[in-house]
Amino acid sequence: MGEYLDLLKRNSNFRYLWWGNVISLLGDWFNLLASAALVTELTSSGVAISYLFLVRFIPQFLFSPFAGVIADRYDRRKVMILADLLRAVVVLGFLLIHATGQLWLFYVLTIVQFILSTMFVPARSAALANIVDQKDLIVANALDSFTWSTMFALGSFLGGVIATLFGNQTAFVMDACSFLLSAWLISRIVMPKREPSNTSAQGGWLEFVDGLRYLWLSPLLLMIGLVKAAGSFVWGGINVLEVSFANHIYPLSTTAFPRWLSIENGGTATLGLIYVASGLGTGFSPLLMRRWLGDARKRLTTGITIGFSLLAIGILMLGFVTSLPGFLVATFIRTFGTGTIWVFSAVLLQVMVPDKVKGRVFAFEFAALTLTESISVLAAGYFQDTFAWSLIKIVFIFGWFGVAVWGIWLFFFLFTRKRLNTDEETRSEISPSI
C-alpha cells in the first residue's frame, strides 16, 4: 500500500478529491440500503424494485451527453461542487416519503438526484486525469476502486445497521450531510489550467456528437469505452435479484441477534452482508490483478478478459449454491471480476484519450453503461413478475449472458492484442483529428 499512501501524501489535490469521494460514497450506500428498504416496506412488487434502479440509471443515460459537454466546457471543480450541494437538498426530500401513494415522489426525487450525479461523474473522471500525473493514473484509479469498494462494504454494513436500528430517515439525513462535506473538500482543490475548448460555439448535442465521432474514428477506444456497458448488461439484473434473494431466500433470522438490537428486517441485514462481499471483491481485485499483471496496456486488456470470465463464473455459481455463505463466496468471485473490468477500462481511457474530449468520452461510457444496466434491471423484474420465473432460473439466464459477453470480448482481445504490444503502436492507432 506504500505507493498509494505516497500518492495521497504528495498530491494534495488528489487527496482532497479522494477524501470527498470517501465521504460521499459512504453516504451513497446508506442511501441505497435505505431506498431499497423503503420500497420493500411500501410494496412487495419485484418491478417496483426494478424501478428503483431504473430511476437511478435512465436519467444518467439521457443527461450524459450534456454532462460530458459541461465537463469539457466549464470548470470541473465548480461542476462537482454544485452537483454535491444540490444533491444534499434533494436527498432531504426523501424524508417526506411515508406511504405507498407517495412512491411517485420518491421516484421523481431519485431522478433529480441522479441527473445531478450525472453532472458529477464525468467531471470527476476527467478532473482526475488533470490533477494526477499519467504515471500515477493506475495507482489513483486502483485506489479509487479500493475506496469505492471499502466504502461499499463499510457503508452497506453501517447503512444496514442504521436503517434497521434507527430507520431509513436517519440514513437519508447522513447521506445529505456527506454531500455537503464532499463539496467543502472539493472546494479546496486547485485545478491546473486547461487547454481552451474549441467547441464552445456549438450546441451541447453537437459537441457530444463531436466526441462520438472521435470514438468512431478510434475503434480500439470505442470498444474499450463499451466494456463497462457490456459488463453492466450482465451484472445490472443481479443487483435487482440480490434484493429478492436477501428478503425471500436468505433473510437473517431475528433469533440470531441479541434481543436489544430489535432487528425488524432480516432481509436488509442480509443485503448489507451481500454488499460487504461485493465491496471486498471489487476492492481487492484491481490491487491484486495489477500486482500480478502490471501496468502495460496489453496487460490491462488481459485483466479485462479475466474479469469477464470471473463475472460469468460468479453469477453461475449463485444458481448452484444453497446457503448464504456460499452465496457470499459466489458474490465475491463475481465482483472480483467486475472490479477488474471497471478499473482497467477506466485507466485505458484516461491514458489514451486527449483531455479536450475526455469529458465527452467518459459521458458516452457512462451513458452506454446506464442504458444497458437499465435494460438488465428491467428484464430481471419483468422475469420475476410477468413470467413468474424462479430466482435461480433468472440467475442462470444472466450467467449465460455473461458467458456470451466474455466470448465477444475474448474475440476482440485476440484480434487486437498485437496492436497493444508497445505504447508507440497504440498511439499511432488513436490519433485521428477532431
Image (spheres, rainbow, N blue to C red):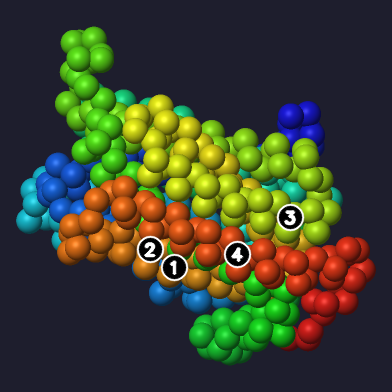
Farthest front residue in view: 320
User: In terms of sequence position, does the residue under pointer 3 or pointer 4 come before the other?
Assistant: 3
Judge by depth and name the residue closer to the eye, 385 or 273.
385
Q: Residue 376 — which label?
A: 2
Report the Cα–Cα distance between label 3 and label 4: 13 Å
Q: Closest to the observer: 50 or 390? A: 390
198 versus 374 height, above or below? below
Nearer to us: label 3 or label 4: 4
In the rendering, at what x and y percent does residue 93 appear?
24, 50
**1 and 4 marks in contact (CB < 8 Å):** no
Is disc 3 surrounded by few (<14), some (14 to 19) or many (20+) residues within 10 Å?
A: some
For label 3, the residue is 302
Q: Judge whether residue 66 can be spotted in this image.
A: yes
- The amino acid type found where label 1 is placed reads Thr
Instruction: Choose the circle earlier in sequence order: 1 or 3.
Output: 3
Q: Whole-Å distance between the Cαs marked 1 and 3?
A: 23 Å
Left or right? Give the position of 245 relative to 230: left
Q: Residue 372's mark?
A: 1
Q: Residue at x 42, y 31 (%)?
A: 326
Q: Tell me which label, 1 or 4, sits earlier in the chain.
A: 1
Q: Mark 2 to mark 1: distance in Å?
A: 6 Å
Amino acid at dot 4:
Gly
What is the C-alpha distance between the residues marked 3 and 2?
26 Å
Which image quadrant: the C terminus?
bottom right
Q: Position of residue 357 (x, y in %)?
A: 68, 74
Judged left or right of residue 97, residue 90 is right
Q: Please tell me which residue is depicted at 72% across the width and 65% down the height of the picture.
A: 413
Quadrant where the N terminus lies?
top right
Q: Front-most of 133 and 432?
A: 432
Q: Earlier in the sequence, mark 4 or mark 2?
A: 2
